[in-house]
Amino acid sequence: MGLCWMYWGLEENVVGGCEVSEFAAVVTDIREESRRDGRQRWQIALDHTEFDEGDTGVLEAMSRSGARLTVPVLAVEADAEGEVWHVVEKPLAAGTEVTGKVTAKRV
């Protein structure tokens, strides 16, 4: 896999070293993955995803106050039932509309 970097600006994303795949989705479920040293990690399921296992990227959403949230996707995993879970450190509630951006594809 090549080296990818991303800069999140106010108006646009500037990406170097890789293609960005972008898609719209809605959070359908969330569960706590782990809690270590006071830090929580969450697993988020979406109604649609273009992430594959091993990919990384971001989920973007708007908060109730109108602030733009950027949540890094640290890992993507599928469970025994085939549900795809996006591992993050910031929870997003079920029903939240997101824009997913895959910035590093597994090779």
Image (cartoon, helix red, strand yellow):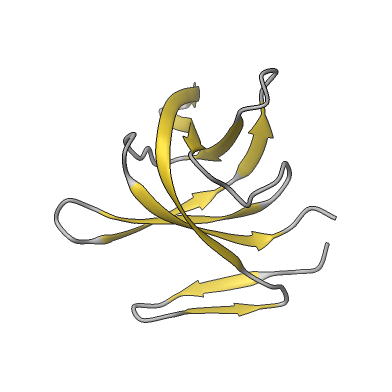
On screen, 53 above or below 97? above
On screen, 30 above or below 13? above
Residue 22 horizontal side relative to residue 17, left or right? left
Residue 82 horizontal side relative to residue 68, left or right? right
* Quadrant position of the N terminus in the picture: bottom right
| Residue drawn 66% across the image and 23% down it | 79
Q: Quadrant of residue 60?
A: bottom left
| Residue drawn 36% across the image and 81% down it | 11
Image location of residue 43, percent across then percent down: 51, 31
Number of on-image labels: 0
Q: Looking at this view, is 1 or 29 the one in front?
A: 29
| Residue drawn 59% across the image and 46% down it | 74
Residue at far top of view: 80
| Residue drawn 42% across the image and 29% down it | 29
Image location of residue 89, percent across then percent down: 46, 40
Q: Looking at this view, is 10 or 53 the one in front?
A: 53
Residue 55 horizontal side relative to residue 44, left or right? right
